[in-house]
Amino acid sequence: MTQWALQDAKNRFSAVVDAALGGEPQTVTRRGIPAVVVLAVDDYQSLRRAETASAPTFVEHLLAIPKDGPDEVFERSSVELRDVEW
């Protein structure tokens, strides 16, 4: 991945974009520390799809909640109810 200092990236933004469109993500640094990555929209969308595909669905998330089993009983906290006026 090519690195650009922020000022150089500003001065040569077309080159940064062209390189990203060519399939090579471009890192822009601020004070020598990587700050952002410029990449093509297709690459970004591909990453987002992969992230979404690997994320559990809401149902999978609920089913992953620990349950009591034959060898293990999960301790539940006791909650004291309070009076509510209607």
Image: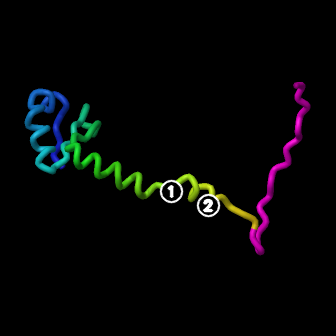
Answer above or below: position of 59 versus 35: below
Q: Pointer 2: residues within 10 angstroms few (<14), some, or many (20+)? A: few
Which residue is found at the position 46% from the left and 55% from the top?
55
In the displayed image of the protein, which residue is found farthest to the front? Answer: 86
Label the magenta part by its dominant secondary structure. Answer: loop
Circle 1 residues within 10 Å: few <14, some 14–19, many ≥20: few
Relative side of 50 to 25, left or right: right
Q: Are marks 2 and 1 in contact (CB under 8 Å)?
A: yes
Q: Which residue is mark 2?
A: 64
Report which quarter residue 73 is drawn in.
bottom right
Residue shown at 61%/60% (left/top)? 64
Numbered tag placed on residue 38 in the rendering? none
Residue positioned 39% across, 53% down in the render: 51
- Magenta span includes 72: yes
Tell me where the magenta segment starts and ends, as one range.
Answer: 69-86
> Residue 50 location, x and y as percent?
35, 55
Residue 62 sits above or below residue 15 on the image: below
Camera-side residue of 85 and 76: 85
Residue 73 vertical placement versus 53 (above, below): below
Q: Which residue appears farthest toward the bottom when viewing the image? A: 70
Q: Is residue 26 left or right of residue 64?
A: left
Query: Circle 1 is placed at which residue position?
Result: 56
Identify residue type, mark 2.
Ala
Look at label 1 and name its amino acid: Pro
**Residue at coordinates 15% horizontally, 32% vertically from top-left?**
9
Residue 59: percent from left, percent from top? 58, 56
In this view, 68 is above or below 29: below
* Mark 2 / mark 1, whichever is N-terminal: 1
| Label 1: which secondary element | loop
**Is 75 left or right of 85, judged from the image as shown?**
left
